[in-house]
Amino acid sequence: MTAPLVLRAIPVEDRAWLVAALDDALAGGAPILPLAPGLDPADSGVESIRSLPLPDDTAVVVRTSGSSGVPKAVALSRAALVASAEATHEALGGPGQWLVALPAQLISGLQMLVRSSVSGIEPVFAPEGAGARELLAAADQLEHERRYVSLVPVQLARLLDLAETDADAAEALTRFDAVLVGGQAVSLELRRRAHALGVSLRRSYGMTETSGGCVYDGVEIGDTLVRIRGGEVQLAGPTLALGYVGDAAQTEDRFVVEAGRDGTPIRWYRTGDAGELLGGMLTVTGRLDRVVISGGVNVSLDEIERVAREFPGWGSAIALATEHPEWGSRPSLVVEIEPDAAPFDEVREAIRARLGAAAAPEWATETEKLPRLAGGKPDLAAIERWISSLRSSFARARGAAADAPVAAAPQTDEGTTE
C-alpha cells in the first residue's frame, strides 16, 4: 500500500513550483500535498500526514476544509482528477482558460489547476483575498476565447453587488462562458440576480472526495452516478477518491461497494448530505447531521437558511441550534449586516409559514463579518463557539444585574419612570 514516492509538501504561495509539481504528479511523479498560505512544511500536522502510508496511485493529497468538523486528508489519484477535469470541460462546452480565485490547497482551487494542466492552457491567478473589483481586473489577463471561473456564493454575491451598479463590471462578469459556484447552496435570490444580469451561472455540487464538482445544475457530469439511500445523497464514478490517509475505518464507512443490477461491483461515496432525485435532477436539501429537534419536531437548519437567504440582505444567514427551556432547542440566525436588509420579523414569518412553527428562529444576531474558512465557507464551529460565548456573557450579565442592589428608577419631569 505504501506509495513508491515520498509525498511532497508544496506551499501554494509558490505558484510556479505548485504548478510544476502538480504537472509532475499527474504524469506519474511524486504525489503532492498543497499547503495553505503560511503553513510551514515542517509543521507537525504536515509531517504526520507525510509519515503515513498512501494508497497506491495517489497523485494528490488534499485536506478538506473542515467546515463542520476536523479536516480529513483525502488521497486522490491521477485518473480521478483527470476524469473530473475532462467531465467539466465536456459539460461546459470545451476547454478554456481558468481564473483561479479560490485557494489552491482546497479541491475547488486545485481542480482549476488540474483542468489547466489537462488542457495545456495556462491559468490566471487572482490576487490572494481579492475583492470583486480586483477579481474582475485579473480577468482582463485572460486571453483564451473561452473564459471560466469557479467561486463560492459569497464571492458571487459581492460580484453581483458591484455589477448591479457598475456597467463595466457587469460586462466583465458576463464575458465568462461559465461561472461555477459551489461549496454551499446558491440561494434563489442570488440565482435571480445573476440571471437578470445575464451571468452564465452553473451550480456545482461535489466535494474533495469526488475530486470537485460532479453534478452541475442538478445533473451528473461525465460518468458520475447519483442515488438516494435513506435520504442520503450517494455518488459513484471515476472521480471518487482513493480514501482517507491514515484512517481506514472512516474510509470503509464512507466508501461502500455494492453490486449493480448486472452484478458488477460499484463503489459509492456516502456524502452525508440529504437530498432528493426528482425527474432525474438532484436537489440537495442540507446536511443529515444539521437537524435540530424543536418541540419534538425535526427541523433542518439548512432548510431554514435556504428560506432566509431568499430575502434581500440575508444571503449570508447561518442557522444554529440553541437551547430553549420550553422547546428543548430552537433555531436562531446569524447574519452579516447589510444595508436595506429585510426586517427579521418578515424573514421569521416566512420561515414559519413554509417550514412550520418549530422552524421559526427565536432571534437573529448581526455581525460585521462572519468567521470563514480559507475557501469562503462559513466556519460553523467558530460561529457556534462565538454565539455560545456571547450567550454565556449575556447570562452572566443578567445574573450580575439580578444580584445587584435595586436602584431608584430615574424620573422624568412628569414624575413617571422611563
Image (cartoon, helix red, strand yellow):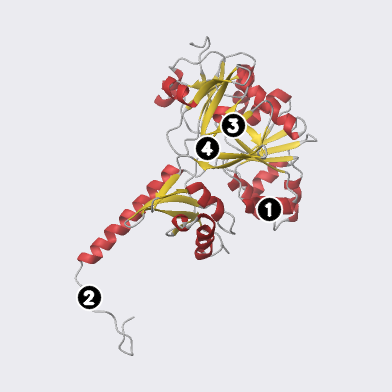
Mark 1, mark 3: which one is toward the viewer? 3
SS for callout 2: loop
Q: Nearer the viewer, residue 185 or 328?
A: 328
Q: Are marks 1 and 2 in contact (CB under 8 Å)?
A: no
Point out the frontmost of discs 1 and 2: 1
Other residues around mark 3 within 10 Å, as few (<14) / some (14–19) / many (≥20) = some
Residue 127 visible within the image: no
For label 1, the SS is helix
**Which label is found at residue 231?**
4
| Along the line of sight, the residue nearer the viewer: 155 or 131 | 155
User: Between marks 1 and 3, how big is the CA–CA gap?
Assistant: 28 Å
Q: Which residue is mark 1?
A: 192
- Nearer the camera: disc 2 or disc 4: 4
What residue do we see at 40% from left, 48% from top?
A: 293
Labels 1 and 3: the sequence-earlier one: 1
Residue 333 in the image, given as x and y percentages of width and height? 46, 55
Amino acid on which disc 1 is placed? Arg
**Which is more N-terminal, label 2 or label 3?**
3
Q: Residue furthest right?
A: 145
